[in-house]
Image: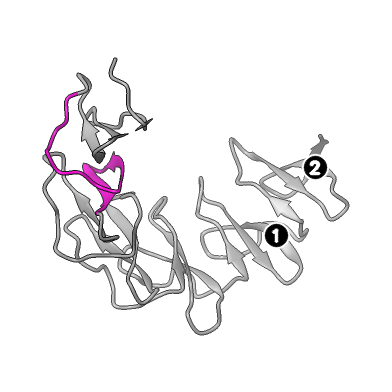
Amino acid sequence: MKTFKNRLKFHAPGLAPVEDETGWYHIDTKENPIYSQRYSRAFGYYDGLAAVTDFDGNCYHIDTQGKRVYLENYAFCGNYQEMKCVVRDFDGNYYHIDINGKRLYSNNYRYAGDFKDGYACVKLPESGMFIHIDGKGNTLNGKRFIDLGVFHKGFATAKDTNGWYHIDIQGNEVYKQRYQIVEPFYNGFALVTDFDDNKLIINEKGEKILCV
C-alpha cells in the first residue's frame, strides 16, 4: 500500500481523494492516479462528480475522468446530493446548481444546505429566517423558521422563539412541546434535550417514552 500525506475513503465508482507532495488528486482501487492534474484540495465522488479546489482558490467539480464539468468558479462547492449541489459565489451568495453546473433558480441565499428527500434548507437574505425549497427553488409550504433541519422520513427539525421541535411536510408542528435540542426521528423515535438538560426519547406524537 502506498503512503500518502492524506487519504480519504473510496466512493463509487471506486475512487478516493489522496494527497502527496504534489497536491491532492484521485486514485483508483489499485492506487493509480486517474488523471495528471493536482489540486490544493479534492473531495469524494457523489453522483459521479467530485468537488476540487485549485491552487488559485477556485472551486468546481470534475468527472470520473478528471475533466472539469463546467466553466464557473466558486468560493465553495458542496457535494452533489440528489443530482443537485450547493455552491457559494465570490460575493457570498449561496444557491444550488444541477448536475451540468447550471443554476436551478435565480434566488440567492445567505446559506443553503444539501437536498434530502427532495427538499433543502435555505436562509433568506432579508430576514435571516429559514425555509424549505424544492428542486426548482420554490418554497415548500410558505412557513419560516428561526432555524431548520432537512426532512427525514417525513419530519424535519425546526426552531421558533420557544425552542426546537419537529414539523411535518406542511410545516405544521407535530406536538406542542419545545426543547433545547432535538434530533431527527429514527424508526419512530427521537432523542431530545429539555431546558433542564434532561435527555428524553419521544415518539412521533411527541409523547415522552423514556428518560436517558
Indicate the quadrant where residue 96 lies: bottom left
Point out which mark residue 164 bears. 1
- Report how far apart the C-alphas of labels 1 and 2 lie in the structure: 14 Å
Residue 177 image offset from top left, x and y in percent:
78, 58
Point out which mark residue 32 bears. none
Circle 1 packing at 10 Å, graded few (<14), some (14-19), many (20+), is: many
Left or right of 194: which side holds 141?
left
Magenta span contains residue 33: yes
Circle 2 residue = 199
Residue most toward the front? 21
Front residue of 188/190: it is 190
Q: Residue at x 24, y 47 (%)?
A: 39
The residues colored magenta run 32-54
Circle 2 packing at 10 Å, graded few (<14), some (14-19), many (20+), is: some
Left or right of 110: which side holds 40?
left
Q: Amino acid at mark 1?
A: Trp
Magenta span contains residue 34: yes
Q: Amino acid at mark 2?
A: Lys
Q: Residue at x 42, y 74 (%)?
A: 109
Q: Residue at x 28, y 49 (%)?
A: 51
